[in-house]
Image (cartoon, rainbow, N blue to C red):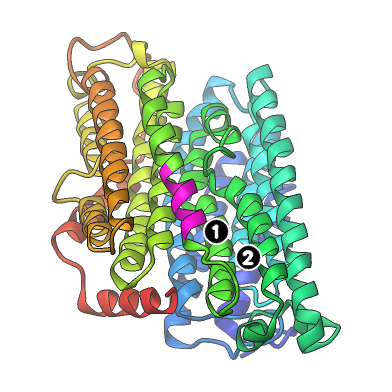
Amino acid sequence: MSFATGLPSSIGVLLATPALAAALLAPWSHPRSGAWINVAACAVSFLAALGLLVQRPEAGPYILVDDLNIVFVILNTFVALTTAVFSATYISHELETGRLTPANLRIYHAMYQVLLFGMTLALVSNNLGVMWVSIEVATLSTVLMVGLYRTPEAIEAAWKYFMLGSVGIALALFGTILIYMAAQPVVGEGQDGMVWTVLVTRVQEFDPALLNLAFVFLLLGYGTKVGLAPLNAWLPDAHAEGPTPISAVLSGLLLNVALYAVLRFKLLLALNPGALAPGPLLMGMGLASLLIAGAMLYRRRDIKRLFAYSSIEHMGLIAFAFGIGGPIANFAGLLHMVMHSLTKSAIFFAVGHAVQVKGTQKLSDIRGLTTSHPLLGWSLVVGVLAIAGLPPGGVFMSEFLLVTSTFATPFPLMLLAVPLVVGLLIAFGALMLKLSGIAFGAPSPGTAPVKASYGPMLLHLALVLIAGLYLPGPLVTWFQHVAKLLG
């Protein structure tokens, strides 16, 4: 069946579910049942996303589902679901301790669904303008959640996020307008100048100078959302001051959505023979993010800020992979994106409960977790070792592919493998240094035990470890096909 909009059922359910859930949860007066309504809505969204594997809608002026964005859609809805399950117990503790009020939780649950709606619409949009609006909706919803605790620090973090995000989205809007201006002489005025499936077939005829200028603005604009250096100032504050489930969603999902937008425009430039090569810009910003974030890890004193900088490092790696290009590097970028989303969200699940049992975010006051809370502590150890790139985790496989593909490039491009490996080693050293104190040694004093949901964390870690040992053939074939599409 179809909805009144004419959308096939899977894509209609995928978009309608979070919108209707947000409308239901905004006035909902029972915070605990609201948490499980949030979970149920995310479960329906995930099932609808899986339905796209069976039946994809025909591309229209507003909706497009292809091999590229379906990877992001399924990953987004899966992590949103597991984070909602984690969130149900996490938020219950925050309510009991008085850090959040029932009114705050109504905002939280409603905005969670608005965020999921915005991200999903951005991913499946065939219209560049609709994609821009959707990413802005997702950004504004997270701004409200970052400031949810209403402390001076949380308000400051939300305000910084809003201001820097607004600058970024304004730059992205200008870049989008320039794309339309480049398309107008070729495809004419009207909607066709913003429709991806139209642009990609006629982009060879566009003015290369306008395309080049547009991509610079788009990379800076959406790069702000990705958290690429030097546009990453908002990200550590947003992670540190907002509820931990939002840190998981920011690192695991929203950064990917902004990167997806960059990849769409990278494809346009690659198809125009006169346009600049977008790879060097992505490689430059990616390497800068890796090296700067790796160095900053050593000076972090807040556990959530520590892993926020780790997210910047890994988004830099992913941007670098797509900048190098080619079948192997693009495959590594896609795999690393998936592995980072699963691993980093699992780490934030562990960090969220660690902060609750210790009553603080200060690294100096979170010690000996493997002794005081063995399951939590050892899960965090596994997560940190995985995100640091140790085998047999999936992150090791993607980083190995990226390093080897960089060495395989022609001279002098192959020399970039040196700063790449140096950046990875810098970050590895910092994470091992911090982990030794968090996990081992004499336990620091803690609060009373809290009810924790370990299922999502253990599921993510299991998937990451399995991926390091074995990737199903259909998944490999799918990623190889997408890697070829990315050029």
Q: Is residue 84 above or below residue 271?
A: above
Q: Evaluate if marks 1 and 2 touch, with contact meaning CB atoms under 8 Å apart.
A: yes
Query: Magenta residues?
Result: 280-287
Residue visible at 19% across and 32% down in the picture: 378
- Residue, far front: 412
Q: Please state which of residues 448 and 209 is positioned toward the viewer in this rendering.
A: 209
Q: Is residue 31 visible?
A: yes
Q: Which mark is residue 144?
A: none
Examine the image and state in which quarter residue 196 appears: bottom right
For the stretch drawn in magenta, the main secondary structure is helix
Residue visible at 21% across and 58% down in the picture: 404
Q: On the image, numbered disc 2 is attached to which residue? A: 122
Task: Check disc 1 and give the amino acid type.
Answer: Val
Quarter of the N terminus within the rendering = bottom right
Q: Is residue 102 above or below residue 11?
A: above
Circle 1 — which element? helix
